[in-house]
């Protein structure tokens, strides 16, 4: 009963808020009849546009259009900049991101003339938001930081907290989770001071979600629980359901499935009242997963079927994809292998569609960037042309005199060159012949280079797709492992190993090709090397456990050890070194990975207890396609490319890499990078 009373109160409150907002709009609109075609009318129109920001109404665009037209007519540029700002917001809400970006940039260029920093900061935030939605995270971060600087100068606390929040979100997207939490906490501190309960709850949720990504589930629950209490106080029903679900997810990750089910059911009860199809679909999916882990297959199937039905009716393709995947897992447990294959095929089809849409989005983003750069270049070119015309008009007589003198000098030079040419002509016959031969060789060389590039194109595009298809088919066949003989299972394992090796070899060949062709997209930034080492070691847990190898990380102290490097290339360097250490280590041994600061350098050492490197192998250790005389101890396959990639990546990041013999037998690879 209390639940329904609370829902009634929420509905009534929302109705009053909407009524109040509509009353304010009606008052503003009624004033339009009292204003002529003046600046005051433009200002009034933009006040209406501001009031319409969070309201979906077809007439909203008419007010924006009138404000733009009137601003142009009376030459009121400040009003025009504001009108374009609201048009950009309207287009963003309609998900027309490319058009919204162009309009916001136009608004910014006009507003820059009037030095109203608050307006400029508003543009920065909206441009950053568009880039965030288009996954241009570096550009988005740059605009949010620009907005933050202005907000700090104005000491606008609420706006500063919003900037901190957006910066934290970008750091989360790019994987800088600790940095993300740092900015979320800064935002939370301001919101607590302002006593904005809704914003406080949102900050607490964001911090909890980031701790979830770090795998610190108890810490995540602490913040989710605080957010839950806030949302209960402010009577945010949807927020309450989300926090129950978030707490359930932390228990699920800890494999405490009964506790996870308890909170999933609490979330589900609230969402049944709200009747949002996407939220209900999500709840059914999580309940289906929990019941599956608990072995309650009938209940799991019931909820997964409902999740599929609701996700098809709604707009959540990701929920539909995950429902098919979980259903395939359930079918396998039930022994219904044909159904498992069908559901897995449905999962792969939706996944393919989502990836295709992402790729199309990236192409659209690239085209937008090109169009914007083109427009900026055209404006700059026009400005330069006007400046050149002015200079030419001011200096016309000087140019004429200079032209006459230049003509005389050029005539003398031509005479001298022609005379010298005829004098040396007899001596150039042999050189001409040599030149012809060199040109022929160059033509042949270009043909060979083109053939090589064509081969690499085949590797990059024509081979990767069939390898992925083979891998997918092997996964589907593996669902029927109970129906296969031991010999057939062993053959499938061999196919899978060969496919993975081929993909690894292809990936490394393409990495070397990218290095050789100077197509590296180097992005130097502060990188937390401890996090990278931990991620890589965690990724090799299965490979190390298969050989009963213990990988131990030794860190000098607990302070943050950051380097100035490219995050992706640093990850690849550590990945290759630890991969080699596991490949060449005997069973039942250990690998030490140490991290130390030496002056202004950060040193990473990877030490194994394998056979080490022979004197002959040391001479070609970092060369391409060099397979060493020492063989992997577990039958693994070596491509001969890993160490050459390590050397190239470390060099371009201004670091050093070398090899030393381990005193207790084995190999020691050392990498030094510059401390941030």
Image: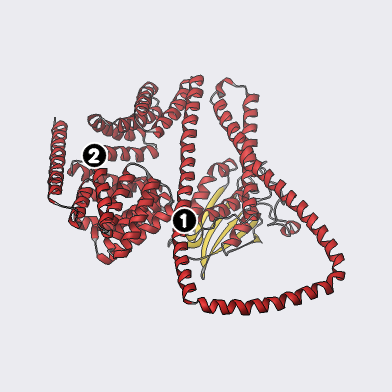
The mark nearer the N terminus, 1 or 2, is 2
Q: Could you tell me residue 148's position as x and y percent? A: 32, 61
**Pointer 1 with pointer 2, Cβ within 8 A:** no
Observer able to see residue 189: no
Observer able to see residue 357: yes
The residue under the point 22% across, 38% down is 237
C-alpha gap between disc 1 and disc 2 = 34 Å
317 up-or-down from 513: above or below: above
Looking at the image, residue 117 sits to the left or right of residue 608; the answer is left
Q: Quadrant of residue 520?
A: bottom right
| Residues packed near mark 2 inside 10 Å, few (<14), some (14 to 19) or many (20 plus) | few
The residue under the point 67% across, 41% down is 635
| Residues packed near mark 1 inside 10 Å, few (<14), some (14 to 19) or many (20 plus) | few
Q: Which residue is mark 1?
A: 373
The residue under the point 70% across, 53% down is 624
| SS state under label 1 | helix
Q: Could you tell me residue 377's position as x and y percent? A: 47, 59
Looking at the image, residue 10 sits to the left or right of residue 258; the answer is left
Looking at the image, residue 330 sits to the left or right of residue 536; the answer is left
Q: Which residue is mark 2?
A: 57
């Amino acid at each position: 009963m209390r639940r329904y009373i609370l829902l009634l109160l929420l509905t009534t409150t929302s109705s009053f808020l909407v009524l109040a907002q509509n009353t304010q709009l009606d008052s503003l609109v009624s004033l339009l009849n009292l204003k002529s075609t003046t600046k005051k009318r433009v200002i009034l129109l933009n006040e209406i546009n501001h009031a319409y920001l969070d309201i979906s109404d077809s007439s909203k665009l008419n007010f924006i259009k009138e404000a733009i037209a009137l601003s142009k007519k009376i030459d009121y540029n400040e009003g025009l900049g504001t009108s374009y700002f609201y048009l950009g917001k309207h287009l963003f809400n309609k998900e027309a991101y490319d058009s919204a970006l162009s309009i916001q940039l136009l608004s910014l260029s006009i507003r820059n003339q009037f030095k109203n920093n608050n307006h400029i900061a508003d543009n920065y935030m909206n441009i950053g938001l568009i880039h965030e939605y288009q996954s241009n995270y570096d550009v988005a971060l740059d605009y949010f930081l620009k907005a933050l600087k202005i907000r700090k100068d104005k000491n606008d606390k609420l706006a500063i907290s919003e900037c901190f929040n957006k910066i934290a979100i970008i750091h989360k997207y790019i994987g800088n989770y600790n940095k993300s939490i740092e900015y979320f906490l800064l935002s939370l501190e301001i919101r607590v001071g302002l006593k904005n309960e809704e914003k406080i709850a949102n900050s607490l949720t964001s911090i909890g979600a980031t701790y979830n990504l770090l795998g610190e589930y108890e810490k995540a629950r602490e913040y989710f629980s605080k957010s839950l209490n806030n949302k209960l106080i402010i009577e945010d029903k949807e927020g309450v359901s989300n926090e129950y679900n978030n707490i359930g997810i932390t228990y699920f990750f800890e494999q405490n499935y009964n506790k996870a089910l308890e909170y999933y059911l609490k979330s589900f009860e609230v969402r049944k009242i709200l009747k949002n199809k996407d939220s209900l679909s999500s709840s059914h999916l999580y309940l289906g997963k929990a019941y599956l882990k608990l072995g309650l297959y009938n209940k799991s199937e019931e909820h997964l079927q409902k999740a599929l039905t609701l996700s098809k009716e709604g707009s959540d393709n990701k929920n539909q994809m995950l429902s098919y995947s979980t259903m395939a897992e359930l079918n396998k447990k039930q022994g219904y292998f044909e159904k498992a294959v069908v559901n897995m095929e449905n999962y792969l089809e939706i996944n393919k569609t989502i990836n295709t849409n992402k790729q199309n989005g990236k192409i659209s983003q690239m085209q937008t960037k090109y169009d914007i750069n083109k427009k900026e270049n055209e404006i700059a070119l026009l400005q330069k042309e006007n400046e050149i015309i002015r200079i030419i008009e001011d200096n016309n007589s000087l140019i004429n005199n200079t032209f006459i003198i230049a003509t005389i000098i050029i005539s003398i030079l031509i005479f001298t060159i022609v005379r010298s040419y005829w004098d040396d002509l007899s001596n150039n016959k042999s050189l001409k012949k040599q030149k012809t031969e060199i040109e022929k060789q160059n033509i042949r060389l270009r043909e060979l280079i083109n053939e090589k590039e064509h081969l690499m194109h085949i590797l990059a595009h024509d081979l990767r797709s069939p390898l992925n298809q083979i891998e997918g088919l092997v996964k589907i066949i593996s669902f029927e492992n109970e129906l296969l003989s031991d010999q057939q299972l062993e053959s499938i394992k061999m196919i899978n190993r060969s496919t993975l090796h081929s993909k690894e070899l292809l990936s490394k060949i393409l990495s070397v090709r990218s290095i050789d062709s100077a197509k590296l997209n180097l992005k130097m930034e502060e990188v937390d090397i401890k996090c990278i080492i931990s991620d890589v070691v965690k990724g090799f847990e299965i490979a190390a456990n298969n050989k009963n190898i213990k990988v131990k990380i030794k860190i000098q102290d607990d302070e943050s050890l950051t380097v100035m490097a490219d995050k992706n290339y640093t990850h690849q360097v550590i990945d290759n070194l630890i991969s080699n250490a596991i490949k060449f280590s005997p069973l039942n041994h250990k690998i030490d990975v140490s991290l130390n600061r030496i002056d202004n350098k950060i040193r990473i050492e990877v030490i194994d207890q394998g056979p080490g490197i022979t004197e002959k192998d040391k001479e070609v250790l970092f060369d391409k396609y060099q397979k060493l005389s020492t063989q992997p101890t577990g039958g693994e396959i070596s491509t001969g490319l890993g160490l050459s990639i390590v050397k190239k990546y470390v060099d371009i990041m201004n670091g050093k890499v070398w090899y030393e013999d381990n005193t207790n037998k084995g190999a020691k690879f050392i990498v030094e990078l510059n401390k941030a």
